[in-house]
Image (cartoon, rainbow, N blue to C red):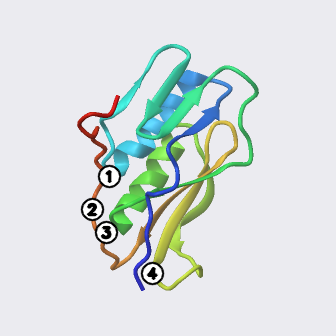
Amino acid sequence: MPYHQGRLIDHIGIHVSDLVRSKTFYLAILKTLGKSDGFGGDDKVFYFDELYFGSEGLPSSNLHLAFQADSIEAVHAFHSAGIAAGGTDNGQPGYREYHMSYYAAFLLDPDGNNVEAVCDVGAARSSASVIVTRNEGDA
C-alpha cells in the first residue's frame, strides 16, 4: 500500500556538545547515503538540507533520527563509517520485525542520540527529493 512522506517537517534543529565532532560524524554517515554535498554553516552551526546543528544551548538528547538508505550495502556502509567517525553501535545491520522489508542499522551519535539508516528493500520512491520553487508574484 503506498504512503506519503516528505510533507510534514520543514526543518529540525539539534543542539550538540561539540560542533566539530558532530559534523565529522554526520558528514561521514550522510556521505555513505549519497549525501556528500549540501553541507553549510559556520563555527556556530552546520546544516544539511532540513537538518540544522548548533552548539549553543544544552545538547539535544534522546532523539531518534532515521535516514533513508537506497540499499542494504548503504546501510552497512553507514554503520561502518559511523563507528569510524566516533559513533557507538546501537544495532548491527539487519532485518527488523517492523515489517518484512525493513533493513536497518543503528548508531549513537557523539551526544548519545539514536541515529538509524533504513532501507525498505524492494520499495520504490516517487522522487529522490522535493524541489521547492517560488511562485511568481509571491514576495
Q: Secondary structure at mark 4?
A: loop
Pair 1/4: label in front: 1
Residue reaching furthest to the top:
43
Pair 1/3: label in front: 1
Nearer the observer, 10 or 48: 10
Type of amino acid at the residue the image marks with label 4: Ser
- 3D distance between C-alphas at marks 2 and 3: 5 Å
Type of amino acid at the residue the image marks with label 1: Val
The answer to whether the residue labelled 2 contacts the one labelled 1, judged by CB atoms less than 8 Å apart, is yes
Q: Could you tell me residue 93's position as x and y percent? A: 50, 66
Q: Could you tell me residue 30's position as x and y percent? A: 41, 44
Point out the image quarter for the N terminus: bottom left
Q: Secondary structure at mark 2?
A: loop
- 3D distance between C-alphas at marks 1 and 3: 12 Å
Type of amino acid at the residue the image marks with label 2: Ser
Q: Residues within 10 Å of mark 1 (few under 14, many from 20)?
A: few
The answer to whether the residue labelled 2 contacts the one labelled 3, judged by CB atoms less than 8 Å apart, is yes
Residue at image mark 3: 125
Q: Which residue is at 61% across, 53% downward?
A: 89
Residue at image mark 2: 127
- 3D distance between C-alphas at marks 2 and 1: 7 Å
Type of amino acid at the residue the image marks with label 3: Arg
Q: Earlier in the sequence, mark 4 or mark 3?
A: 4
- 3D distance between C-alphas at marks 2 and 4: 20 Å
Point out the image quarter for the C terminus: top left
Question: In the rendering, which numbered label is found on residue 101?
Answer: 4
